[in-house]
Amino acid sequence: MEQPNEKDITQQLLNPATRRKAFGMLVSQYSEMLYWKIRRIVMFHDDADDVLQNTLMKAWRSIDSFRGDARLTTWLCRIAINESLDFVRHKQALTMLSSDSTSDNVGVAIHERLLADDYFDGDRAEAMLQEAIAQLPDVQRTVFLLRYYDEMKYSEISTMLNTSEGALKASYHIAVNKIKEYFNNRD
């Protein structure tokens, strides 16, 4: 059976009579894509599952505010990214409150947790890259992840994050340099 396209789902979402069915199609069609966007930001499978659920619940509760001006995937990704960043900020705040560890120790904990995660299929280098990414400020981390992993164009990221392309290019360049510096300092 052929999956409905984004335009069809959007039209059905905007119609209260078909909204529930359309949302089911949305969940079926876009959950995996959203999961991987979220997973790259929060890093761990269980956390990504929780944030995905929060994202879908927020999308359902906010469906009346979706007017169809932006693409459905752009709207969903914006919700997923915001939920992911909120989750990471909350987790960092809890870590700082409950621990006197330095940010360097937090990075090592991320590396160890990733390698122990049954759902992490990367090697040591990928775990180190994730450590480096985790230490970036939110905007730089998000731009880097969207450009590097999703290969999104700056124009797409600009629409999604409501930021100028120039600012995004600068953020990406700074993020890449910080990641290089992280690896250089690990040698």
Image (spheres, rainbow, N blue to C red):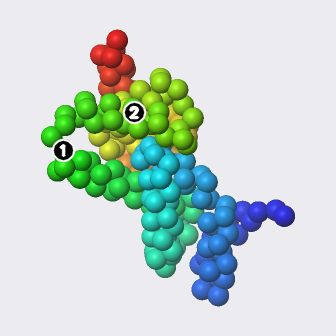
Position of residue 76 in the picture relative to residue 141 (left or right)? right
Above-or-below relation of 52 to 100 = below
Count of numbered circles in the view: 2
Q: Is residue 165 visible?
A: no
Alpha carbon distance from label 1 to label 2? 17 Å
- Residue at label 1? 99
Question: Residue at horizontal 41%, vertical 27%?
Answer: 128
Q: Earlier in the sequence, mark 1 or mark 2?
A: 1
- Residue at label 2? 112
Amino acid type at mark 2: Glu
Q: Describe the element under mark 1 as helix, strand or loop.
A: loop
Position of residue 39 in the picture relative to residue 180 (left or right)? right
Figure quadrant of the C terminus:
top left
- The one of 74 and 50 positioned closer to us in this rendering: 50
Q: Residue furthest bottom?
A: 17
Above-or-below relation of 49 to 133 = below
Amino acid type at mark 1: Ser
Which of the labelled discs sits on residue 37, or is there none?
none
Q: Position of residue 34 (x, y in %)?
A: 55, 54
